[in-house]
Amino acid sequence: MTLALRTCLLATLLFASAGALFAQGTAADYQRMQQLSRMTSGKVFRDQVKPNWLPGGDHFWYRVRTGPSEHEFIFVDAKKGQREPAFDHGKLAQQLGQQLKKEILPTRLPFEQIQISEDFQRVIFQVKGETFQIDRKEQSLTRLDQPAERLLSSMPAFQRPYPSTDKGGEVTLKVVNETNDAVKLFWIDRDGQPVFYSEIAGSKQLEQGTFAGHVWLVLNNQGQALSVYEAVDRVSVLKVDGKQVRDLPRRRRRGDRGARTRRTSPDGKWTASIVDHNVVIHSQDSDDPIRLTTDGTASKFLSDRFHWSPDSKRLIAMEVTPGQGREVTIIETSPEDQLQPKVHTFGYDKPGDKIRQEWPRLFDLEKLEEISLDRSLFENPFATSKASWQADSSEFRFLFNQRGHQAIRVLGIQPDGNVRTIVEETSETFIDYTNKIHYDAEPTENELIWTSQRSGWNHLYLVDATQAEIKHPITQGEWVVREVERVDRDQRQIWFTAGGIVAGQDPYYLHHCRVNFDGTGLTILTEGDGTHKINYSPDGRYLIDEYSRVDLPPVHTLRKVEDGSLVCELEQGEVSSLLETGWKMTERFAAKGRDGKTDIYGVIYFPTNYDPAKKYPVIEYIYAGPHSAFVPKTFSVQSHKRETSELGFIVVQIDGMGTNHRGKAFHDICWKNLSDSGFPDRIAWMKAAAKKFPSMDISRVGIYGGSAGGQSALSALLSYGDFYDAAVADCGCHDNRMDKIWWNEQWMGWPIDDSYAQNSNVTHAHKLQGDLFLIVGEMDTNVDPASTMQVVNALVKADKDFDLLVMPGKGHGIGSGRYGMRRTRDFFVRKLYGTEPRR
């Protein structure tokens, strides 16, 4: 062999070795991805607090995981602001080991539940059916005989003493033992389990502190029930005379109070019904029917959605015109129960369809005639809802959403037929009626809490319903009210969540707040840089605040509801074991959007074998539906995006303009413009991220998404093919005229105009650049699968190459299933790395 040939072979081998060393999408990468979930599962500790509140509302305990199969019990005294172990775990393990004659580790105590006495001095638990008690002061362990446990477990469920509940304040229970023998006193806890308290000698008595609604059980030495008693809101005396209780008390069940259509008037004098599409009433004094309407037909009929005024003098019935009743037909090619295909149809209104509409009609029961109404304020309804009479029969109120979603009103119909606007919202673009309308019918009130974006930001307003005017804004500023959680009319306070209310934090982070009706007393109840969720104590005086970020495991604190002040810190999530696996913390990143001013927020996922000196193709997971925002804000260990990154990609997710939960100007970008999908912001964000992380190779960019995300993924190649190289579109709603009415008309408007065609991927299919993979389930009932096939048709006509996967028997989102995700990842390995996957 010549020197030149040897040199050539050596160079070839070195190149092949280097290729094997730095190749991506290999069998080893796939194996590592498949093992990622198992490798990282169960490696986050101290990340959950599930409180067990004790009587009085100032104390609770919880069990927290501290390591693999390890835990400890924590006792919290909220009055003192103290968090401490519920007992000495080391001493208990030693004593319990002696009792059970086996080694017990302090971190692996063989029980998960405890009971704590009302004086907080004793902890009771069970191991293998045996009951033990710890004296918290002396740290001494005692084995208990639990006749109450045996008694209750042997009794039919319907005879057992019911669990204790909190019905009032502290009371004193005096137990008088009138027998000559000792008796045992047990508290029945909130789970219905007996907790031993004390033994009362014969002819002796005991005063026991308790709470109204708490249940107590007295047993004799033979384990027989002598008394079961529920403490009441006063000093109670329980006399035990030695006679065995035969029938133990049971909790009273309230009658079914579920709402039903009221066909009979409140005074019982009239009964309404529908006969041949018309309203007919009967008097209790006569068998002769009285027809209140005669114009009802199958195409315009009266429904039995009746609303009687409380004084029985007026009746509202709803006139209905049915919609066209569009049906979508799909073919199941491979049914499980037969060889031949099946044809399925289902109702499915699409944008522009004639829809079912309802209008209220008013009837006078004194004159037995209809009162004509001016419909100009509620013409062309998309929906009428939240309808009710005021308690004094002065007005019938309802929420009216006009088709096109540019006008929403609370309307009032008065007994004389006058129709008035109490409050309304209008917009030249759209009103986000599915997320930003708060109206609760208040039959006894003439003040309404209303949400509005009239300032450009979603805020609360106080409405004077009598004067039909807004009194004043309750909240204001360049932040948004996300959700009204509770309205306390007695205290005249509103409890809500807000985004962007804390300066310097990600505006999507949720904080919990309270404000007075007059706008004073705005209190942020949560603290910490992250998104929050809270858990109130039973009496509402305390809350446990849990917050986290994608790069911060959960933090738990105890706070006062009164002012949000810190009582004590509880837990900080521990992830050292997780990081030891090579798992990488998700990276938060913000950059300016298309206007050079607005911050755009996103996250970045790196593979566990990430090398900052290498170059990685970038894959964006996209969902840009205007109904919400989608970038994760809470801590999570596993996701399909993280798994995809293991194949040698950097995966990103971004919320561009046009998505929700920011100011109205941010949101309005989507108006008649869904194909925009925030791409100018996304591309600017990725370019900025690549400057901070040079390992991001934005010369190779893929994108994938499902449903509205599938529409966006394909749109990326149609409109921004100079930036995106490959796309996977799963079950996309590629033409908004083909998709469900409520979602698409909200953002694209009504009536249907040319903007629908201009936003359609079918219209622009001939502009395809890059590599496309379409996935659709033939049994999709969420998005008509014909939407994908119409894109296929347009691509074929334009002589474009693409991949298509039709999944027999599968529904919406099948691309996120196991097979669909495997094919998606294989596609990106082929197109962005140019290698065959799983080599």
Image (cartoon, rainbow, N blue to C red):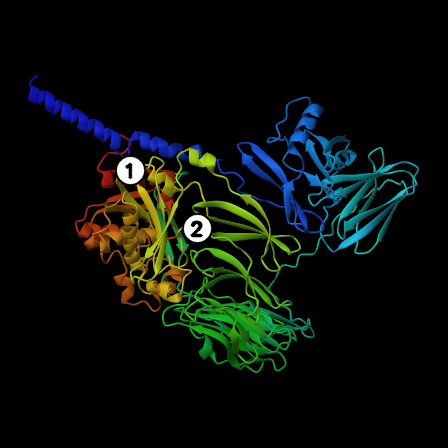
Above or below 20: residue 677: below
Q: CA distance from mark 1 to mark 2?
A: 28 Å
Classify mark 1: helix, strand or loop: helix
Position of residue 693 measured from the top left corner of the image (x, y, whole percent): 30, 45
Residue under the point 29% across and 42% down: 805
Classify mark 2: helix, strand or loop: loop
**Quarter of the picture holding the N terminus:** top left
Q: The residue under label 2 is which amino acid type?
A: Lys
- Answer yes or no: is residue 115 visible: yes
For the residues bearing labels 1 and 2, Cβ distance under 8 angstroms: no
First in sequence, mark 1 or 2: give its number. Answer: 2
Residue under the point 63% across and 81% down: 366
Mark nearest the camera among 1 and 2 is 2
Above or below 387: residue 190: above
Say which of 271 and 65 sits in front: 65
Q: Give the residue number, with chain letter if any, for mark 1.
A: 826
Position of residue 733 measured from the top left corner of the image (x, y, whole percent): 33, 54
**Quarter of the picture holding the C terminus:** top left
Position of residue 656 measured from the top left corner of the image (x, y, whole percent): 34, 57
Position of residue 609 measured from the top left corner of the image (x, y, whole percent): 34, 35
Toward which corner of the image does residue 506 lie, by quadrant? bottom left
Say which of 29 and 741 sits in front: 29
Q: Viewed as shown, does residue 792 lie left or right of 578?
A: left
Within 10 angstroms of label 2, few (less than 14), some, or many (20 or more) residues? many
Q: The residue under label 1 is which amino acid type?
A: Asp
Q: Give the residue number, with chain letter if any, for mark 2.
A: 633
- Answer yes or no: is residue 809 visible: no
Say which of 116 and 589 sits in front: 589
Residue under the point 83% across and 36% down: 224
Toward which corner of the image does residue 488 lie, by quadrant? bottom right
Q: Residue furthest top?
A: 1
Q: Viewed as shown, does residue 178 lie left or right of 48?
A: right
